[in-house]
Amino acid sequence: MNRRIHGGAVSLLLTALLGVSGCGGGESTPARNATTVTETVTEPATPPSPHTAPAPDPTSPEPVSPRPTNPPTTADASAVVRAYFAAINAQDYRRAWDLGGENLSGSYSAFADGFAVTAHDTVHILGTAGDIVSVRLEAAQADGSLRIYEGTYTVRGGTIVGADVHEVTGPERPPSPYYEDCDEARAAGAAPLHKSEPGYAPHLDRDGDGVACEPYPP
């Protein structure tokens, strides 16, 4: 009794597993179509490293750095002042005007006429701070006297644009030589003597024409 039940249970289990009908000649149960599932895995974007610079945009123009401007050096500023007085000593007043005289005088004619009684200017550069040049100026006059000036010149762009110069002493006339007579003046190589020259004296100018110790008549 127990053996039959056990045997029948085994047969039913095999039939269910194999999908075959217990009756001979029956159609087999068709198997379900298998479905293939493809799983798509999306990798997360890798964040850029904080130490890596982003690639430049090829369509963006490259920035243009401004050209550095070189300010004038102290040597340039003092050189302009020296050139200015060199032009005055050479009586090239047009060049001196272009170097800054036009900024120091109302007109060119007044500027040039201002040096009519100046024989020579000697400029000493006392110091330079940026575009400010400090000077001491010794202006020898045509009458033999000497005037001393001190102050500053302001130079920008290779040109004197301003000046603050004042006279520190009055005219200093060197001691005038004294000649007893024209023979002494001639021996010293000073004759003839004009009225504006050192050593002239009325007692040497017998005819009073303003010229003393004139050459002997032939």
Image (cartoon, helix red, strand yellow):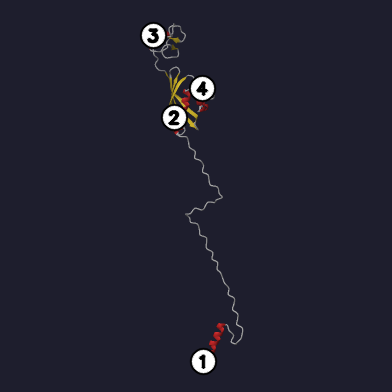
Please state, as top left, top right, bottom left or bottom right, where the C terminus lies in the image.
top left
Vertical comparison of 51 with 139: above or below? below
Q: Secondary structure at mark 4?
A: helix
**Image location (x, y in percent) of residue 202:** 43, 9
The one nearer the camera, 203 or 42, is 42
Q: CA distance from mark 2 to mark 4?
A: 23 Å
Query: Mark 1 packing: few (<14 Cα in 10 Å), some, or many (20+)?
Result: few
Name which residue type carries label 2. Answer: Ser
Q: CA distance from mark 4 to mark 3?
A: 40 Å
Vertical comparison of 135 with 44: above or below? above
The residue that disc 1 covers is 3
Name which residue type carries label 1. Answer: Arg
Label 2 or label 3, whichever comes before in sequence order: 2
**Image location (x, y in percent) of residue 109:** 54, 22
Of marks 2 and 4, the one in the foreground: 4
Rendered image: mark on residue 112:
4
Of marks 4 and 3, the one in the foreground: 3
The residue that disc 2 covers is 134
The residue drawn where x is 38% and y is 8% is: 183
Q: Secondary structure at mark 3?
A: helix
Label 2 or label 1, whichever comes before in sequence order: 1
**Image location (x, y in percent) of residue 216:** 43, 7
Q: Secondary structure at mark 2?
A: strand
Q: CA distance from mark 2 to mark 3?
A: 48 Å
Task: Determine whether label 3 and label 1 are within 8 Å by CB.
Answer: no
**Image location (x, y in percent) of residue 86:** 46, 25
The residue drawn where x is 53% and y is 22% is: 110
